[in-house]
Amino acid sequence: MKRIDVVGFGPGGYEYMTVQAIEAMKSADVIVGYTTYIDLIRNLFPDKNFLNTPMTREVERCRIALEEAMQGKQVALVSSGDSGIYGMAGIMLQVVQASGEDIPVRIIPGVTAASAGASMLGAPLMNDFAVISLSNLMVPLEQIMKRVECAAEGDFVICLYNPKSRKRKDYLEKAADIIMKFRKPETPVGIVRRAGRENSSCELTVLKDLKYAEVDMFTIVIIGNSMTYIRDGKLLTPRGYVLEEV
């Protein structure tokens, strides 16, 4: 019986992976993950045995990882981004706890889409910020929008994950309308597509025009607070440092 490593491998590019994440995948006998995520890393570890399941089969993936570990295999259960932020760490711990098995679980963090995307835009997350997923697969829409409202009222920079899908076409527009109750229409906004992956791109816009932006499930949206500004093509939220005149 060996350990289960729950690995956050970052946005997808090898250069975004931590040494710890790479070593965990190299040392694994089997790598388990969501099909799309396995496709991102398969060529990087060609000699490994991969097991994958489609979307919404998270519990099944964790049970597969547990079964493999109980057979004496070293297992890496992978998530993009950080395994403990919208990743597999929590459910893997729950599955092991529910099983009653004494199997060690190690959580390995990774670069999140928020931090990777922010680096492409400039420095928008330099002050307090909130990360909110607009996917209502696990959380009721009413609760999601309440969180958006509270973050907007608290003047947090807001980073939105999963802003739109084929079934959720207007959630981003609804969130923007709520935020505009507390912020100016000209509030700067950064949009990043496929952060840290091939063909990544980013653009700057303002809150009032956010509803016209092209976004999907591989996009993150960072909405500035009352202090955020755009200068020289960079999105920046000041931390509050006093700059002495030279």
Image: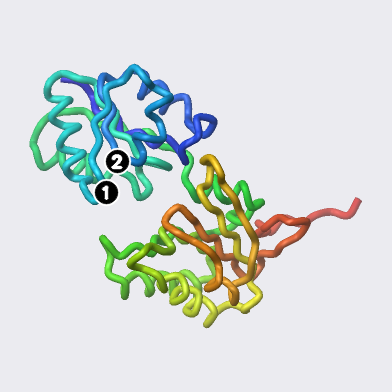
Percent coordinates x, y for residue 30 in the rendering: 25, 23
Q: Residues within 10 Å of mark 1 (few under 14, many from 20)?
A: few
Task: Identify which residue, 170 or 223, lies in the foreground.
Answer: 170
Vertical placement of residue 206 versus 107, above or below: below
Left or right side of 182 for 23: left
Secondary structure found at label 2 = strand
Q: Find residue 89 and report its horizontal and vertical position in percent.
A: 29, 41
Q: Are marks 2 and 1 in contact (CB under 8 Å)?
A: yes
Q: Give the alpha-carbon distance from disc 2 to disc 1, as whole Å.
A: 6 Å
Instruction: In the displayed orientation, state which residue is furthest to the bottom.
Output: 181
Which badge, 2 or 1, comes first in the chain's sequence?
2
Residue 186 higher or lower than 54, as above or below? below
Q: Nearer the viewer, residue 73 or 165?
A: 165
Task: Write down the residue under mark 1.
Answer: 55
Q: Amino acid at mark 1?
A: Met
The residue that appears at 42% across and 64% down in the rendered structure is: 164
* Pointer 2 residue: 34
**Three-letter amino acid code at disc 2?**
Tyr
User: Image check: 131 left or right of 201?
Assistant: left
Spot the residue most to the left: 100
- Disc 1, SS: loop
